[in-house]
Amino acid sequence: MQNFPILSLLTFLPIVGMIFILSLTKRQEKTIKWITLIVTGVQLLIAIVILFFYNFSMAGINDPSSFQFVEKFRWIEITGLAWVGTIKIDYFLGIDGLSVVLVLLTTIVTFIATFASWNISKSIKGYFALFLLLDTAMLGVFVSLDFFLFYVFWELMLLPMYFLIGVWGGPRREYAAIKFFLYTLLGSVFILLVMIGLYFSATETLANGSKVFSFNILTLMDTANYTTTGILSPFNPNNLRFIAYIALFIGFAIKIPMFPFHTWLPDAHVEAPTAISVILAGVLLKMGTYGILRISYPIFPDITIQLLWYIGLFGMINIIYGALAAMAQKDFKKLIAYSSVSHMGYVLLGMASLTTASLSGAVLQMFNHGTITAMLFIIVGIIYDRAHTRDMDAFGGIANQMPIYTGFVAVAFFAAIGLPGLSGFISEALVFVGAFSSELIRTITIISTLGILLGAGYMLWAFQRIYFGELNSKWKELKDLELREYFMVVPLTLIIILLGVYPSLILQFMTTSVNALVKFMGDAQIIISSIN
Amino acid sequence: MTESVLIKLALLILFLPLIGFIVTLLFGKRIKWLYWFENSILILAFLLSAVLAYFKLTHFTDQTLISEFEWINLGSIPFVKSIIIDLGIMLDNITVLMILTVNIVSLLVHIFSVGYMKGDKRYNRYFSYLGIFTFSMLGIVLTHNLLMMYVFWELVGLSSYLLIGFWYEKKTASDAAKKAFIVNRIGDIGMFLGILTLFLTYNTFSFDKIFYQISTGNLPFGTEFGLTVAGVLLFCGAIGKSAQFPLHVWLPDAMEGPTPVSALIHAATMVAAGVYFMIRVFPILSGDALLVIATIGALSAFIPATIAVTQNDIKKVLAYSTISQLGYMIMAIGVGAYTFAFFHLVTHAFFKAGLFLGSGSVIHSMHHEQDMTKMGGLRKKMPLTYITFLVASLALSGIPFTSGFLSKDGILAGTFAFGSLTGYWYFAAVGFIVAFLTAFYMFRAIIMTFHGKPKNKEKFEHAKESSFVMAMPLVVLSALSLFFWYSLNPFNPNEGKLLSSWIKTPEISVPQSARYEFMKTDDKIINKENLEEVTYSNSYTEAIHHAHYPTLFTSASLALLGILFAFIFYQWKVFDPNKFAEKLKPIYLLSFNKWYFDEIYYASFVAGTIGLSKIISMFDNKFIDGIVNGSALFTKNFSAFTGKFDNVVVDGLVNMMAYISGMFGLFFRRFQTGKVQTYILFVVFSLIILLYIFR
């Protein structure tokens, strides 16, 4: 199993589907939808197969030999380029405990988003083709171990997203799409600059003994591979490494989104169609935090450790600022969007303490936030499809009109509040356990616990306004869930409850890797401090 | 019956109500009779818990049974502590007695609800919620570690939210549910931080391991102050859940829920969870932490008692009395009267559930009238309800021959002994004053409801005694409010099995130097085989002995005095209470308006948070997004400008060059005449000029 290119299959299957769809005529709407559903369904199955063959004891992180399902071959090779010499770029895929969880999340969310896309009526062919392209890009980001390849997928994701918001979105879709595109592109520029800087700083020894520059993320993690004069080398006494870290961090932070780079998110969410909101919140935001954990942390452990307090501080700001901003919203979808800002703050807070508990919590929170927020956006979509408004004050008493729907809403809301027994609690608790144990950010952690309170505040208030009270007679016609909607909410509900009761199901995949990362960060700090 | 069978039995009791919840929730809408499923599950759970209690108390009297399993294992890095989170349950005498109490009250409330909730459109839903409540409450009782305690703690919060807001069409009900959840969360944050502190230090959530570590002198942050902080933080959870000052404001509002819910959750069991939690962690509460606890308990006993005196809503009176009684228990913990805190918890559970169900019976027959000023004279219409209500009120007031007398007297003796040992007499003073107030407001309520003439004739005419399913629980609960269940001597609780052999003062883990003076172990305690009674120390045992009779007489007389005053004011109307209120207007208004807690909290915290959220949202829109949009606009304008510049200046230059060359061209074109004569002329002129130059 380890030799079969299963990751490539997983990643590029949607491209195959896309080509199929493009070869169809516009009229074959049903076929297009079914192809998408089959592709995403098969992807989910592949992800489950991967989980089945996944070896818990292999750590990954910085050790190429303990990555799993690795595929590596030369992709681009240009020799004898003036000044630069040889350019060699690898097609290098592989997963470890950090990425396997997110691969699973991506396939789950995409599969469910396909159901959410079912009632798209405008140019279906284009929509689903772009949808599948987006799918490939997202998975590519999570399985790439070569920075260049990572960057390609990272950028590839922008294009379909831009069109999916800009063409199929709400009234202000163009504004939102351009804002999203330019904002993320700005981040990409930072990432690109740092990537090139890193490329010229570290070398990889080839089989024939010659040394070439490398985009290999694992190579970049090892201080021994850096040249003494490399621009971003730890041996280089300039301060550029610090600046590069900040730039890279901003590049990823825009995606998370971290305060103050978050304002594209509410607009993008409000305008995006339901399925795209689901993917945006469910998967895309995690690419930011994943990037930090996969690239920023292990490549720049020295700078990371200097800046942990600030990472924690921004985590805290995200948690509290996002919660307070959510509280003031009248638009249901905007409230959920800001709650995402708040919940991603827990991921940042967890990353700010290099302990097993909080890093596990952070990665688990990515997964849990992905499923919970996906469900929340589906919930918004369901009511919007029926009522054509998202103004919370216009509702009231929906619980009586749509009791089953309201039951699922309650599960999602309480999961978002962090009710024990549901998945959100475990990850938040682990984050707090770990963050509290770090003396550096203890005060920040204590202040952040206010987020638990504020979260309950805005969620329950919203719940009351929409679902409780006397039924507004305007909504007498609203029907309860239909079959398609059950396909979306039931699996997510089951995941939320199952992981709330038995989180080890997901945690077991990541513990070895998280521990390896913690250890690596500790060791690297010692090595680098011995250099300086 | 072996240990493992008992553990399995306990697990069965724990999960039965969960099954009831799931089944009734999922299928309750289709299958109308499913509430009987939930009820039979409770009957079964009650029987099993009786069996469990019997075997535990008789066969394993002095043993603590623990069963744990590994829930989360985060692995380990060399040289760093590994993180393993266990879940598990613990069975000791307190646990099984509490399970039995919870199941008895829960079962009776289930049965009562069959009649009370009849005709409700979400009838089965209601029973499923009762199921998840019972499950969560049993979880709190059985748990062996802090994390699980927190988990079930929040789950009872959820069930409380669902049940308070059961009639969510009413704005007041959904408001009350939200308020209860959020106010509880405030306390929970403290509790959570306390748990984190302990986990940070001991790397485990299990009670016994933490207790052991503390007894070896390993303290949080290495200081006694750290231990006190941890204890007070844990206590924050109890402040929220047990509705203690200053977080008591949610409980009176919680009366918006159906009355049987108020009986089960907001009087008998859930609100007692805070007390139960403090009982569980009692061994690690340092002297300073206990003093904080006692002070909060005393305030919570006193303030609501003064409020209950002027309330007219029968459920509000009971709600404030609940807070006040919980304050008693918390105060008892604070002064070290550990066994009596638990004892009062149990007795209070029965008589307060009886009172609430009694009030439910009244409210039901009065067609949802809760205002006592519109009642009166119901004694004749509802004799059974009257008598049971009276018995339970006597117990609450602490009149001899009731269970409440035994337990409350024990607490008062504890405060008295505490006063004599430490000099802090005000706990005893508060205890006695509250005992007087309690008797007064309870009998005020009885007289307003059941005595005198009916104030609302129409509703009075329709009132009738409740049906069997509603009356039976009342009878059982009032029977449980009598003394003989607990001790055959109505004046000495220590003669009963409950206190003489089942519940004992625990071993304190706190280092000697951080304890109250009287809790320090003295020589006689170390050789405890020779002593009949074992408490913390010899001096404490003596002080308790000396406190017994004085408190007995004082508390009984004060309670009787309270009843007498109630009769003077409301039955015989020797003084007009309204005129009295007029004279003491500021005090009356303070009490009637509940010390203005809600108003103050609303004006400060609620309005503050909402205001802040609006400011943040505006800041986000105008400033942060303003920068984003501004920079976009700037870029756009700048590019427009560059475009113009390009068009006008750059391109202008290019065009000008072209123009100039064009002009040159036009000029020189003139010379291209095509006439040979002209060219010759030019050549000649040019030659002359050249010759002139190079001459």
Image: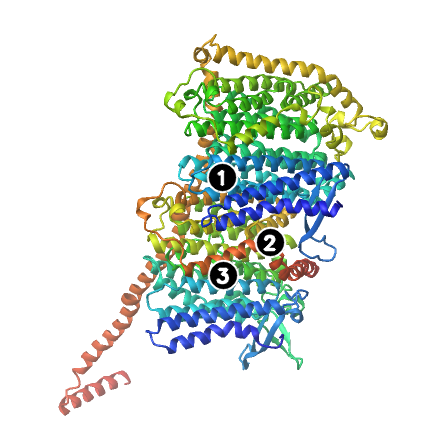
Amino acid type, residue under disc 1 in the picture: Leu
Q: Chain of mark 2?
A: A
Q: Which mark is residue B163?
A: 1
Q: What color scheme is it?
A: rainbow
Residue B656 visible, this orientation = yes
Does residue B610 appear to the left or right of B111 in the view shown?
left
Instruction: Give residue A362's position: percent from left, percent from top.
Output: 58, 55
Amino acid type, residue under disc 3 in the picture: Val
Residue at 33 percent across and 74 percent down: it is A26
Residue at 78 percent across and 31 percent down: it is B512
**Quadrant (top left, top right, bottom left, bottom right) of the N terminus of chain A:** bottom right
Q: Secondary structure at mark 1?
A: helix
Task: State whether residue A45 is above or below residue B516.
Answer: below
Q: Residue furthest bottom?
A: B676
Instruction: Give residue A488's position: percent from left, percent from top.
Output: 45, 59
Q: In the image shown, does B583 or B498 lie closer to the viewer? A: B498
Q: In the image shown, does B110 or A397 lie closer to the viewer? A: B110
